[in-house]
Amino acid sequence: MPEPTLFDLTGKVAIVTGGSRGIGRAIAERLAQHGAKVVVSSRKLDACQVVVDGIAAKGGEAMAFACNIGRKPELQALADATIAKWGGVDILVCNAAINPHFGPAMGIADDIFDKMMATNVKSNMWLSHMCIPSMESRGGGSVVIVSSIGGFKGSVNLGAYAITKAADLQLARNLACEWGPKNIRVNCIAPGLVRTDFARALWEDPVNYKKRTRDTPLKRIGEPDEIAGAAVFLASAAGSFMTGQHMIIDGGVLAGSPANSDD
């Protein structure tokens, strides 16, 4: 039998939230391609099943599970169903997030800000805490939180969202320190602008697209699959000595663009 590669995930069990489209879908598909059994989760079961069927058609193994990450009992049901189906959790990808407010933070309603913090930050902490005991019992694991380059810079119109993404960076560092002794690694991926439905308002307009790519060294925005490889790295033996860190995948934006531009 050939020796496993650094990126081999055979026998591993992964949960991907927000897995029915965009970055989450690309991550789910690539984890499955590398051998993981993947639970594809989002609010809409039918959309998850489409991804599951695509994975199965390519010889992978996956399961669809509907979950609203803002509801703690549904997150617990997601973790429990995964453990019941496949015996445990090795990889958790917290990708789902919301951004219902675009504009200066002065105009955001308190309940909307609270919902953003709960959905984008607290839910990631909840689900991590629900899955980490299983990882510990299996000798280790990997948590990957999808943050954003917005977490590294100020923003005029995406300030509230950026606050949540900065908090996710700190959540990863805290969990990494707490659980590193149990061989559980926690890291963030911080994408720049990627061609997803979630970010459609930022790239669909030709004028805005031209402005955004002008300040990007690669002169284009990213594609979902260009983020997925980082998740495979962080979940696999290739990333076994990396924890408490962030991987910025933005086409070079933070290296070369004005600090006050919106991302």
Image (spheres, rainbow, N blue to C red):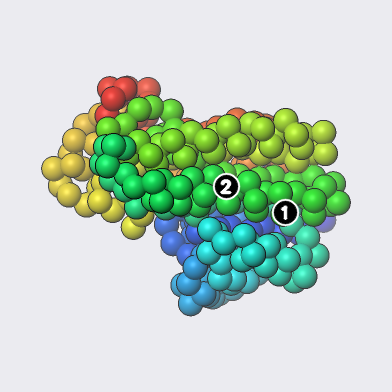
Q: CA distance from mark 1 to mark 2?
A: 14 Å
For label 2, the SS is helix
Q: Residue at x 57, y 47 (%)?
A: 122
Answer above or below: position of 39 versus 123: below
Residue type for callout 2: Lys
Q: Position of residue 113 (x, y in %)?
A: 41, 46
- Quadrant in the rendering for residue 1: bottom right
Question: Closer to the N terminus: mark 1 or mark 2?
Answer: 2
Give left or right: position of 20 versus 256. right
Give 215 or 258, whichever is nearer the viewer: 258
In percent of width and height, residue 107 lies at 27, 42
Quadrant holding the C terminus: top left
Q: Is residue 2 visible?
A: no
Residue shown at 78% from the left, 60% from the top: 88
Q: Label 2 belongs to which residue?
A: 122
Position of 84 relative to 114 (above/below): below
Element under label 1? helix
Q: Residue at coordinates 37% horizontally, 22% vertically from top-left?
A: 255
Residue drawn where x is 28% and y is 53% of the image: 200
| Nearest the eye: 74 or 59 | 74
- Relative to 130, 222 lies left or right: left
When the figure is inspected, residue 16 is found, relative to residue 113, above or below; the finding is below
Q: Nearer the viewer, mark 1 or mark 2?
A: 2
For disc 1, the marked residue is: 131
Which sits in the foreground, 87 or 121? 121
Relative side of 209 to 148, left or right: left
Q: Position of residue 17 (x, y in %)?
A: 55, 58
Look at label 1 and name its amino acid.
Answer: Cys
Q: Which mark is residue 144?
A: none
